[in-house]
Each structure stands twice: as structure tokens, then as C-alpha cells.
Image (cartoon, grey):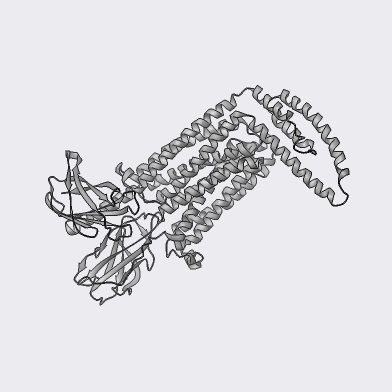
Amino acid sequence: MSQTIAPRVRTLLLLLLAVTGALLAGSAPVSAHAALTASDPQQGSVVKEAPAQVSLTFSEGVAMSDGSVRVLDPKGKRVDTGKSSEQGTNTYSVKLHSGLPDGTFTVTYQVVSADSHPVSGAFTFSIGAPSTTSVSVSDQEAGGGVVGGLYGFARYLSYAGFILLVGGAAFVLACWQRGTGERSVQRLVVSGWLALTGATLAMLLLRGSYTGSGKVGDIFDLALLSDVLQTKTGAALVSRLLLLAAGALFIAVLFGAYEKREDDEEKGDLTFGLAIGGFVVAAGLAATWAMAEHASTGIQTGISMPVDVLHLLAVAVWLGGLSTLLVALYRAPSIEPAAVRRFSRIAFGSVAVLAATGIYQSWRQLGSWSAFTGTSYGQLLLVKIGLVVVLVGIAWISRRWTARLSQAPAAKTVKAAKTSAATPVKATTKTSAKTPAKASAKTSAAASAKASATAATSEKSEDEDRETEDEKEPAATPAGGGDGKRATQLARQRAAVATAREKRVRDADPLRSGLRRSVLAEAGVAVVLLAVTTVLTSTEPGRTVEEAEAATAASSQEATGALAVDIPFDTGGKDGKGLARVEIDPARVGGNDMHVYVQRPNGKAFDIPEVKVSFTLKAKDIGPLPVVPDRIATGHWTASGVQIPMAGNWAIAVTVRTSDIDQVTVDKNAQIG
């Protein structure tokens, strides 16, 4: 049996690792969930006198500590006091020393957004006049590097462990109570608990370095761990560990006292108690994610957190139950069709809950249709929706197999039992015991009493022959230690025969084989879906992205009378990612000056062959109005006299060509006039 399942499970495991590695590698560094929308002094500005402080305004609240904001002079020396304070709604400041010289100063910041993700960045301003600076800002963003990769993997492992723990326990309690005695099911649920516990401990240790320096050596810094315990995320992780202690007790009762209960009334009472206790623990575990991540920030948090708990529980019941069913189909001697039917109904209900909660979450995190295609979060969400559709399609096939399995006539089972019982085993070994044969007969007899009688008759003659051979066998064995070795060899042979017989009984039923294949396909898609979901929870929501960009543009326009729009792009080729910044001055009806700056992801100028811009006012059916700017420097294009005929919400489309064949057009809406 282990030889049968090993290749399939190995393939599924390799798929899991490959998808996880690819997605985590593609998502590093993690997208920030709070954006810098304004600063005083402004980025790139030149002020006449040295300011007393530097202020930063973010799109949402952030957590700051001493040293989160640093101001460096042209020689790289710190000129701030190190003490940061909150000045207003989402605005924070740090005091500067007096008597600062003229020149270019660099401001670096590293904070933690309200939904637990690290945010970092840097900008410059000048006093008196710009100057050269020796400050070099690292290209690596917060949450990247080796520590970021380890933290991302621990997040994935925690989700997987939660699904196996909650879904496996729910499956045996609600659908297949006899499964509490199956070792393979027990190992699956316990593995989920171990994975979730280990991942939670790892995240606690990694958290300080993940949101701070990013150094591997800081993972075991007890001072950082103490700071983490005082944060919202630290409290959530500690709460998760306490709930997992209660989960360990639940598992001990489920696979211990509960499995040994024989009285139906007592078992029914214990089932009810376990169901209530298990739901409380599972809901509490799900709440540790809801209270520290996306659901805890933004709009309607009072609704979004309970909805997020329901969403996570539905995922666990569906995918965790699916994993348990897969193990049962491959490793358990038998599973009742009624249990599969019950799970099919529960899975259908879970999908309905997922659909309802998913629609609400999508609306809350995206905010507009344009965010579906214009933000990384929306694009990942489209991938997730596609995977869910595929998974539901395969699940529909599994439901058909389940219906056929429950309606299969007893004659097929009888025939399978006769075939299994009549298969000769003497070619396998000369000395096989009668216990495996009887176990096989009992398994087959579950379908029909007649099949059981036929199998027993066949086995009796075989057992008599084997008994005679077993009596003769020891006589041919040398005295002494050889008897023990021979007994061990016989035990291994008997186990092999039992395994082969069980496999023949299971494989004799084509309906069960069909169900196994469809469930295995579901599990494969579920692995990819879980990986995409993990990356999605680490990606900045579309609503936050658009609000931050709108706030940045409004702040820029208010201060200078100009409009600045940042549009990320990816031409799909090698070295094809970057950011196009379109500045329009004075952003009013009539003639305007336009500047286009193209930057790499690290903020450096991007030398590309061609840039084109067009303006469209869809509400009035005006445009597109094309503009071909002139290149004046590396990564800098400009055009004068750009005519905007009417005020409105204009769609600004930028076409970027990074090579002879790699080109893309991206757009974003902005208010002009």
C-alpha cells in the first residue's frame, strides 16, 4: 500500500514545494501595506532654512519606534534626535538638531503598517542648495532577503497546518467517526497541529528581524523578541500558541477516550462536547489571523474580522476534509459511501460560505473594478478566483463519483470479494499466516454475506495448507537465534501479504479508483490555491494602493499646482519591470508641461528606447489624445503645450517599450482641471 501511495504523495509534495518557492521568490520583497503620501520638507524640495523637524504622512496608521525615522547629512551622519512622535492622523515627526549646514539630506524610514507588514523607504531634500551626498540607500526593502523568505514560508506552513488540523478533525467528527481509529488519519491531524505550532514559534522568533534589520543574526535576539511580544502581531501569535495547547488536549481526547467509547449514548454526548470545544478552538485560531492582518484595518473592521474568521473556517473544512478523504481513500482499508456523501454536502456548504465571504472581502480590499487589473492584489485575486473555479469543477466530478459509489449494486462488490479471496498467494511465500486472509475476507464481506461465505470457504483450504507448511518450517531452521530471525521474517512476509490483499480489494472497485483520482486532482489544485492565498495576504490591497496614489497626487498638486501620477509597468521581458511617473503642470484646462520619468524598481533611472502618452476622457467620449514626448536625459522625457480641452477624470495611458519586442501600455485615472 505504501508503494501505491508514495509516488502520488511525492508528486504532490514536490508540487507544493515548487509552487511555494516560485510564489515566495516572486513576491519578495513583500509589498508594503502603508504608503508615504506626503512629507515636510517634500521629497526633492530645496528649503532656505533648516527645518526643526521632518514630518511623514502615511496612507494608514503605522507603528513606530525610536530610530524608525533617520535623517542623514551629506556625509552620512545622523542629525535627528531619534525620538519620533505622532503629530496628527497618520502623521509622524522626528526632531532635528540645530545648526544644520547647507546641502542634500537623506531621510530613511522603516515602520510597520497596521496590518503587520513592514514598510521602508527613503527620499532627499536640500537646505540652501543641492549637494553631493555619500549616503547610499540599500535596494532591499523591508521584509525581503533570507529572513523575509523564511517568514513567508512559515506563514504558508501555518495556513497549511491550520487547514489539516481543523479540516481533519471536522471530517472525522461530522462525517466518519470510525476514522478516529485509523492511524493514517491520526497522523494527518497531528501533523497539522505540529506544523501550525512550529510555524507559529518560528514566526515569533523571525518577527523582530523581519520588521527590522532583516539580519539572520537577529533572529535569536531576546530584546527584539521582547519588543515583538508587545505588538499586535506578537499578541496574536502568543494567543495562537495558547489555543494550540487546548488543541492538543482536543486531539488527545478525539483519538484516545473518544475512539475507545463503545456505548452509543456516551459517544453521542462526547461527540457533542468535542464539536462545541473544537469549534471554539478553531474559531479562536482563525481569529488570530483576523485580528492582526488585512481584516483588522481599513473600512468596516467590525464586520470584516468575523467574516474573515468564517472564511478561514470554510477553507479549512473544505480543503482539510478533502486531504483527510484523500488519505482515507489511499490508506484506510475501507470508507463508507455514506461518509463520502456527508462530506460532499458539507463541502458544498463550505464553498457557498467561501463565495459569500470572498465577494465581501474582494469588494472591501479592491474598492473599484480598475484595481482588478491595475494592482498586484487584483491580479493575484483573479488567479485565485480562477483556481477556485477549477477546484469546484473537479469537486463536481468527485460528487458524481460519490453518487455512483453509493448506488453501486452489491454484485460488483461480491465479484471483487471472490476475485480477491480466490487469488493464490503461495507464489508470494511458502509460509503465510491465516490472519491476513481472514482480514481480507472480512473486508470483502462488508458488501455481502454471500461473498463472505465464499471467501471464508476459499481461505479455509488455503489456511490448512499453510498450517501444515508452517508446522514443517521451524524444523528446517537451525536451533538457537535462528528461530527469532525466522519469526521476524515471517512477520514481514505476512504484513506484505496483508498489504497486497488490501490493495487488491480496494483496486478491484473502479468507482473507488475514479473517486481517488478526482480527489487527488482536487488536492493538487488546492496546494497551488493555498500558495496563491499566502502571497495574496502579503500583498498590498488594491484599495490601499489607489487611495495612497490619489493622496500622493493630491498632496503634490496642492503644493506645486502640478499633478504627479505613478504607474507601475511590466513588459514581460527580461528586466522589464519599472515605474512610469507622469507629471503635468499646472494640470489645468489648456496648455500644460508634461514630464515622464521612468525608473527601475529600486528607484534608479531606467534607460529605455521609447515612451508614448495619451489622454482619454471616457465620460465625454474625448480621446485618446496622443502625445509623443522628447527624450532629454536617461529615464526622462518631456513635452510642452499638452492641451487638455476639458476638466474631468482623465485616463492617462503610458506605452513603454523596453526592447525591440517587449512593450506594454498601462493606464491610470487622474483628475485634471
Residue 348 drawn at (x, y percent)? 49, 33
Residue 230 in view: no
Residue at image point 68% right, 24% down: 415
Q: Quadrant of the N terminus?
A: top right
Identify the residue at the far front of this view: 660
Give the x, y percent position of residue 376: 35, 48
Q: Nearer the viewer, residue 112 or 461?
A: 461
Task: Count the labels in the image.
Answer: 0
Q: In the visual, does 651 lie left or right of 543?
A: left
Toward the bottom, the furthest residue is 99
Q: Quadrant of residue 69?
A: bottom left
Q: Is residue 280 left or right of residue 182?
A: left
Q: From the viewer's side, name the closer residue of 637 and 241.
A: 637
Position of residue 637 relative to residue 445, above or below, is: below
What residue is at 31 percent from the left and 41 percent from the top? 369
Picture coordinates of residue 552, whole percent (x, y): 26, 55
Residue 411 image offset from top left, x and y in percent: 66, 22
Look at the picture and state if 396 lies above or below 411. below
> Can residue 304 be spotted in the picture?
yes
Would residue 286 be found to the left or right of residue 671 on screen? right
Q: Residue at x 73, y 29 (%)?
A: 421
Residue 103 quadrant: bottom left
